[in-house]
Image (tube, grey):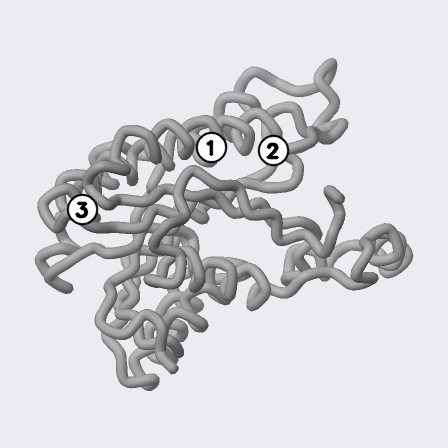
Amino acid sequence: MKLLEGKTAIITGASRGIGKGIAEVFAAHGANVAFTYSSSVEAANALEKELNELGIKAKGYQSNAADYQQAQDLAAEVLKEFGSIDVLINNAGITKDNLLMRISEEDFDKVIEVNLKSVFNMTKAVQRTMLKQRKGSIINMSSVVGVKGNAGQTNYAASKAGIIGFSKSVALELGSRNIRSNVIAPGFIETEMTGKLPEDVVKGWREAIPLKRGGTPEDVANACVFLASDLSAYVTGQVLNVDGGMLT
C-alpha cells in the first residue's frame, strides 16, 4: 500500500544520510519528491535519477535553506513545477562540536543558522501554499541531543531544542487550518558520517541502546512516512523519539 500517493514533499539536505533515506522511502510510497542539496552535485543527480525510475516525479535543487530568499525561491519553484506542497521535511543540518570554553562565536552562530534558522525560513516559505490548500504536514528533524543535551554540543543542542519549541508553536498557530507540525528526534543513526568513527566507539554506542543496535536512515524515514501520511491526521505538536529506547 502506497501511503503517500499523489503527495508532493520537499526534503532539505537529502543527497546523503538520513535525508537520502527519507527521499527513497517517500518515493517508494508514491510521493513526488523535491529535495535540496548544498554541494554534492553528483550524488544529487544520481539520487534524482534513482527516484524518477520508481515512477514518481523527483527533482533536486541546489539551495541553501539557511538563506531566507533562497528558501522563498525554492518553494515558489517547487509549487510551479509540482503543483502543490503537501509535506515539508526540514532535515538539513550541521555540527561544529566543541566544549563551551573552546567554541567560537562563529561556530555557534553557524550551527544556529543552518539548523534552526533554516526551519524558520522553509516553514515561512511553504506556509502560504499550505494555508491555501488547507492541509499540510511539516516534519522537523531534531535529535535526542535537543531533548536531553550533550557535553561538547551546546550549539547543536540549542539548535535542535529550538526546533522543538518552534514546531510546537507552529502546531498551535496552524492547527485550525489542518496543517500539522511535528518533530522527529533521531538517536544514534548509522550513516556514512558515523562510518568514520572507530569501531569500538560505535560498539559502545550500540551496547548502551536498549534495542542493541544503531538506527538506519530507513528507521527515521518510516516514522516520517507516518507523520506525512493521513495515518497521523490527528497528530500534531508531538516529538517522536526514533532512538531504539535511548531516552527511556
Work out which quarter of the rendered image holds the N terminus and state it: bottom left
Taking depth in this image into account, of 183 and 197 the one nearest to the observer is 183
Instruction: State the residue at coordinates (29%, 80%).
Output: 52
Crowd rating for badge 1 (residues with CA inside 10 Å; few <14, some 14–19, many 20+): many
Indicate the position of residue 62 as horizontal and vertical percent values: 30, 54
According to the picture, the residue beneath numbered tag 3 turns out to be 130
Image location of residue 238, percent across then percent down: 48, 41
Separation of marks 2 and 1 at Cα, in angstroms: 8 Å
Q: Residues within 10 Å of mark 3 (few under 14, many from 20)?
A: many
Judged left or right of residue 173, residue 40 is right
Indicate the position of residue 179 as horizontal and vertical percent values. 26, 44
| Residue type, label 3 | Met
Q: Depth check: give the residue in front, 247 or 235.
A: 235
Q: Residues within 10 Å of mark 2 (few under 14, many from 20)?
A: many
Disc 2 on helix, strand or loop?
A: helix
> CB under 8 Å between callouts 2 and 1?
yes
Question: Looking at the image, is 239 positioned above or below residue 151?
Answer: below
What is the quadrant of residue 140 in the picture? top left
Residue 163 is labelled as: 1
**Cβ–Cβ under 8 Å for marks 3 and 2:** no
- Which of marks 1 and 2 precedes in the sequence? 2
Residue 146 numbered tag: 2
What residue appears at the point 44 percent right and 68 percent down from the top-left corner?
Answer: 43
Helix, strand or loop for disc 1: helix
Query: Which image quarter holds the C terminus?
Result: top right
Residue 32: quadrant of the picture:
bottom left
The residue drawn where x is 21% and y is 48% is 74
